[in-house]
Amino acid sequence: MFVKDVIEASLWRNGIGAEQGSWQAAEVLLTSLAFEQLVRGQHAVLDTVARLAASRATWRELVDSYHTPFSLIECVCGDEGVHQSRLDGRVRGIPGWYEVEWSDVVNAKRRWEPWTEDRLVLDAIDPPEVNLLRALDFIRA
């Protein structure tokens, strides 16, 4: 699994910040890592907000070129109050990265490009074991 925030944090730790386009660089690196996995015949899981339709299209093209299955899973939290309460006080502990606050979620939603692709939508309100089974069924199908 490749996590965009971990990749971008490594850029920040090495002097490549938001003002130098760390977000875009992290997306490019995420795509490159996925490419390397596919070249080796392995799977890749990308953990990212994936807010740009162009990013998602690039990933679709990449897997299509390798004739490999592509399972797009969107994770949401259908209850804004629960979403905010889960975020408040959460500590991911990514070296060189900030802890995401509710204002970051609000800002990301403003820049969000709606997903039009076929996908499975999982709601974090549902029990994790239920969402896991849904995801596995979707991937297998």
Image (cartoon, rainbow, N blue to C red):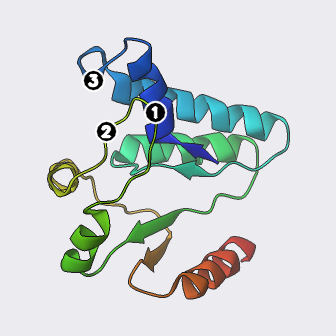
Front label number (3 vs 1): 1
Which mark's residue is nearer the viewer, 3 or 2? 2
User: Residue at the location (70% across, 40% down)?
Assistant: 65
Distance from the alpha carbon under mark 3 to that under mark 1: 16 Å
User: What quarter of the picture does the C terminus occupy?
Assistant: bottom right
Q: Secondary structure at mark 2?
A: loop
- Residue 8, x across and y down, in percent: 43, 30
In the rendered view, does 33 fall on the left or right side of 98? right
Q: Which residue in the protein does label 1 denote? A: 95
Q: Secondary structure at mark 3?
A: helix
Instruction: Say which residue label 2 marks.
Output: 98
Query: Around disc 3, counting alpha carbons within 10 Å, would you say few (fewer than 14), some (14 to 19), or many (20 or more)?
Result: few
x and y percentages locating residue 67 in the rendered image? 76, 49
Kindly check if marks 3 and 2 are in contact, taking CB atoms under 8 A apart as contact. Answer: no
- Left of 104 or right of it: where is 128? right
Which class describes the residues within 10 Å of circle 2: few (<14), some (14-19), or many (20+)? few
Viewer-nearest residue: 138 or 4: 4
Q: Earlier in the sequence, mark 3 or mark 2?
A: 3
9 over 69 or under it: above or below:
above
What amino acid is labelled 3 in the image? Ala
The image quarter in which residue 129 lies: bottom right
**Mark 2: amino acid:** Tyr
Q: Write down the quadrant of residue 70 in the picture.
A: bottom right
